[in-house]
């Protein structure tokens, strides 16, 4: 009987691995297809075959097609995929570290801190590069403040960090509201409001080149230690019994997730619900094992924000802020997760 049980477990494990690899292949194929399709979407429509020829640098392609693809759409599409992947993997990592399904990428105040930094730069009349830099730096400052405040508590470090994040987030949100009150209502205030709603309308190739290495390095770092998130999510006592330094691993995961989230928010503004909802979609596909969950979540996040951005720039003649669309999609889906009792943490 014991041999039969072991054989069944091995067969189930093998089947799970096959399903996981099949899901990876399908998602990668979908990502490549949507990437090519997105390059042709917009006011100036480009057929798929011409898009492929332009990417292959064939000489018989019109210059206007090359300019539209390489100077306008390609940087924005790459940024959308990177930001979607970044917010998704950081959200999943935070949920594992804090053992809380309601945690998102912004739990430690990085979004409100970045919003305050961007608002300050806009009021000072600085250019977009400085707005992005201020957003990144103040996002890091907010998380550092959360760490500092958490040291004042004597409860578990995970709980104290969450509480400190709420405090810092509320504080910086109040500062942003204050800046809105004193901002020029004709020029500065609309810029602040539009930035806070999230958009990729102003993303350039230079922005992607500056931030992509940070986001890619952080994503790779989280993927390399993803198996340790399984141990940390078990609890401090269990992890220590397995010889894992919980505080060290938790610190590394939080630092990596914070840096890449701040980099993403710096160029896109605040785009909500991705880091909260997409990890749950990944769990519905491959389960709670972070060795499988993080790669799947990363790809799904890239696909999701790419599709959302395509809708934002094609549904109307104007530009719909990404934060609005992600909230319109994310809130009913999260309500569905709450209603669906079979989908559990």
Image (cartoon, grey):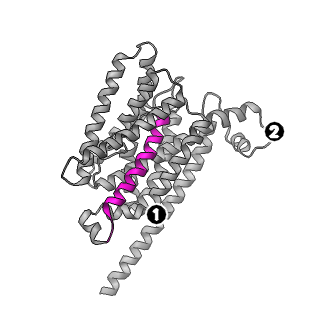
Question: As rendered, which of 256 and 308 lies closer to the eye?
Answer: 256
Alpha carbons under labels 1 and 2: distance apart? 42 Å
Where residue 201 appears, as percent x and y from the top left, is 54, 29
Q: Residue at x 31, y 59 (%)?
A: 247
Q: Which residue is mark 1?
A: 20
Tell me which corner region of the image, top left, top right, bottom left or bottom right, holds residue 35: top right
Mark 1 residue element: helix
The N terminus, quarter of image: bottom left
Would you call the spot at circle 2 few (<14 residues within 10 Å), some (14-19), or many (20 or more)?
A: few
Question: As rendered, which of 69 and 203 lies closer to the eye?
Answer: 203
State yes or no: residue 264 in magenta.
yes
Q: Residue at x 35, y 63 (%)?
A: 230
Q: Marks 2 and 1: in contact by CB < 8 Å?
A: no
State yes or no: residue 218 in magenta.
no
Where residue 136 appears, as percent x and y from the top left, is 45, 37
Q: Which residue is mark 2?
A: 60
Residue 288 visible, this orientation: no
The stretch in magenta equals 243-268
Tell me which corner region of the image, top left, top right, bottom left or bottom right, holds residue 198: top left
Where residue 168 appears, as percent x and y from the top left, is 29, 37
| Comes first in the chain, label 1 or label 2 | 1
């Amino acid at each position: 009987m014991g041999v039969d049980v072991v054989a069944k477990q091995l067969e189930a494990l093998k089947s799970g691995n096959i399903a996981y690899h099949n899901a990876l292949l399908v998602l990668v194929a979908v990502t490549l297809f949507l990437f090519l399709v997105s390059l042709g979407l917009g006011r100036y429509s480009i057929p798929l075959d011409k898009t492929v020829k332009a990417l292959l640098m064939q000489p018989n392609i019109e210059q206007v097609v090359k300019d539209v693809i390489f100077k306008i759409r390609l940087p924005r599409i790459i940024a959308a995929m990177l930001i979607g992947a970044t917010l998704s993997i950081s959200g999943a990592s935070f949920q594992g570290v804090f053992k809380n399904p309601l945690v998102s990428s912004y739990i430690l105040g990085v979004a409100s801190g970045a919003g305050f930094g961007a608002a300050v730069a806009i009021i000072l009349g600085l250019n977009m590069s400085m707005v992005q830099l201020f957003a990144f730096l103040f996002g890091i400052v907010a998380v550092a403040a959360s760490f500092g405040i958490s040291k004042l508590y004597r409860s578990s470090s995970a709980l104290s960090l969450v509480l400190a994040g709420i405090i810092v987030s509320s504080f910086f949100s109040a500062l942003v509201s204050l800046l809105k009150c004193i901002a020029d209502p004709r020029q500065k205030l609309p810029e602040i409001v539009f930035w806070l709603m999230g958009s990729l309308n102003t993303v350039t190739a230079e922005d992607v080149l500056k931030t992509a290495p940070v986001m890619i390095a952080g994503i790779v770092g989280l993927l390399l230690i993803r198996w340790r998130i399984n141990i940390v999510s078990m609890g401090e006592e269990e992890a220590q019994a397995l010889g894992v330094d919980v505080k060290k691993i938790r610190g590394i995961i939080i630092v990596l997730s914070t840096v890449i989230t701040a980099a993403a928010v710096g160029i896109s503004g605040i785009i909500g619900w991705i880091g909260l909802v997409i990890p749950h979609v990944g769990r519905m596909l491959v389960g709670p094992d972070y060795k499988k969950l993080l790669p799947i979540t990363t790809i799904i996040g890239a696909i999701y924000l790419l599709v959302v951005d395509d809708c934002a720039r094609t549904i109307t003649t104007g530009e719909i802020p990404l934060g609005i669309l992600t909230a319109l999609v994310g809130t009913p889906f999260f309500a569905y997760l709450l209603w669906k009792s079979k989908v559990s943490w």
